Amino acid sequence: MGWMKDETGLEKRPANFVPLTPLSHLRRAATVHAKREAIVYGDFRTSYAEYHVRVSKLASALARLGIAPGDVVATVLPNIPAHVEAHFGVPACGGVLNAINIRLDQHTISYIFDHGEARVVLVDTQFLGVVEAAIAEMENEAQPTIIEVPDEQAGFHASGRHLTYEALIAEGDPDFDWVMPADEWESIALNYTSGTTGRPKGVVYHHRGAYLITLGTPIAWRMTLYPRYLTIVPLFHCNNWCHVWTMPAVGGTTVCCRDITARAIYDAIADEGVTHFGGAPIVLNMIVNARDEERRSFDQTVNVFTAGAPPAAATLAAIEPMGFNITQVYGLTEVYGPATECVWKDDEWAELAPDERATIKARQGVAFPNMDHVTVVDPETMRQTPMDGAATGEIVMRGNATMKGYYKNPRATNEAFRGGYFHSGDIAVQHPDGYIQITDRAKDIIISGGENISSVEVESALMHHASVLLCAVVAKPDEKWGEVPCAFVELKDDGSATEEELIAFARQRLAGFKAPKRIVFGELPKTSTGKVQKYELRERAAAL
C-alpha cells in the first residue's frame, strides 16, 4: 500500500472530476431519450428533446430578467408542466429554486419572500391574488417580479396583469449554455418548513445531494428504465421528493396531476399507464374508498411510496390486492424527502398473514442507498439505543442527501446537527434487524395529509382571541387526513366563544389546513410548574 503515499499528479482534473448535479440527467436524456415522452398533462405532451429546449429557453429568459447565480426564483404552482420545467430551468441559469406551498396564507408567503429574497416568482393564475397580497405587505423594498402561469386546461385564464410564462419562454434562447455548478456544494433549492416552531425555516439543498438521491431512489423503488410516474407528491414538498429530478436519469415519463382526486388517479393509471407514484396514506384511503364510477381497471402493478404517517394495516390489506405494491418510506424536508425505506424481505415475510405483513410494512425501515447511516439514539448522549423493538430514542441520520442547513439561521442549524448527525425530532424504536419504527412524533408537529403543522403556530393564532386565556393544540387522529389539529382552550372568566367562532378566527390567521378541526373547552391539565401536560390531551383527542 506504499504507493498510496505518493499522489503526485493524481489531483482532480476536468477529465476525472465533474461536480454532481441532477441537471446532468436532463442534458443526457435530451440525446439518449430524445424522442421519448418526457412530460404529460392532458393535451400537453413533450419529448425529452423538446423538454430540454423549453428548459434552456426558460433559463435564458430568467438570465435576461437579471437572475444571476445564487439568486432565488420562487414558484407558487401546483403539479403542472411549468413547475416540472422550473426544477431544471431555474438551476440551469444558476438560480436557486424556492417552491412555495400553494396552501399557505398571504402572511406566510410574504415572510418567505422577505426571508428568501426571491427576485422572480412564477405564479399559477389560481393563486395570483394571494401572491399579489403577499407582495404588497412585504417589508423588503426589493419585490419579486411576477410571471403568471395560466392553466387553460384547468380553466384558469391569464389575468392580463403580468407577463405570462409562455411569453417569457418565447423570449428565451434554445441554445442557451446552461450554468452548471462549479462546486457541487452550491445551492439548488430553498424549501420552507414550519419544523417545530411557528416561523418557517428555510432548508437549503445542494446539487450533490439532489443528484445522489436521484440515483438512490430508483434502487430503493426497484425501477427499471422508462417508468411512468404520476406527480401526486406536491412539487413544493421536498421538490416532489426529488422525483422529477430522477425521471430523466431513467428515461421516465412525468404525468402531471393538478388536482389529486380518486378519479384523476385512476384515469392516469388506466389511460397513461402509470407505474409509480408517491403519496401520503390519505391517497391510499382515497383509492380504496373510491366510488364505483371513479374506478378504472388496469393491468400493470403500480408501485407506491407512502410517507407522512404509517398507513393503517386495514388500508394496506385492502389496497394491495387491487394491484398496488406499497412501500413505506420516511424522511423530512431536511433530508430531501425519503431517507429510509421498509425493504421487503420476501424470503422471510412472504408467508405471513395479511395483518402481520401490514404491520411490518408500516415500519419506517432502513437507510436509503444514498444515506450513510440512519439509526435511533439517546438524543442527549448520542448512544445507540438497544435494538430490541422496545427501547425508544430519537431518529438521527447522516448522509449526502442532508441539507446544507437552515438559511440565515446558524443557531437552528447547529442544534439540528449536534453530535455529527441530523436530529429528526421523531421518537422511535429499532428492531433487532435494524428496522426503525416510529412510536411518537415530535411533540409540536401534526402531520395532516402529509403536511407538517406546528402546534405552536396554531396556539399562537388562537391566543390572539380576546376571550382565550390558555390553549394547547395536539394531533387528533382522522380517518381522511391521518391527523388534524385539535385545540383545548381555557377561556377567561369574563370571556365567551363558541367552537365555530374560534375555528373561524384561526382560519383568518392561518392557512385553512392548519386551522383546528375541533375545539374543546375546559381547564387544561398542568404540572406543578404550570406546564401543560400534552400527553393527556393527546389521549383525550384520540377518544373524541
Image (cartoon, helix red, strand yellow):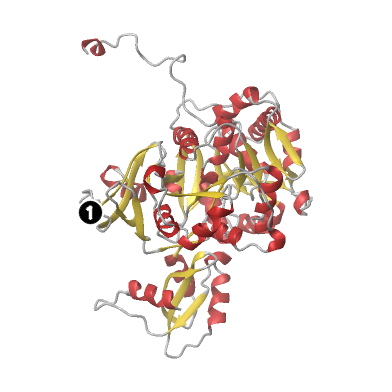
The residue located at (48%, 33%) in the rendering is 215
Describe the element under mark 1 as helix, strand or loop: loop
Callout 1, which amino acid?
Glu
> Which of the pair 279/121 is nearer the observer?
279
In which quadrant is the N terminus drawn? top left
Examine the image and state in which quarter residue 273 appears.
top right
Could you tell me residue 420's position as x and y percent?
Answer: 28, 42
Residue 153 rendering spot, x and y as whole percentages: 77, 50
Can residue 254 be seen here? yes
Is 171 placed left or right of 117 in the picture? right
Q: Which residue is mark 1?
A: 380
Residue 61 location (% of width, % of height): 68, 33
Q: Residue furthest front?
A: 351
Is residue 106 shown above or below 242?
below
**Circle 1: is it few (<14), some (14-19), or many (20+) Cα within 10 Å?**
few
Q: Which quadrant of the structure image shows residue 96?
A: top right
- Residue 57 rendering spot, x and y as whole percentages: 69, 31
- As drawn, the residue found furthest toward the bottom would be 494
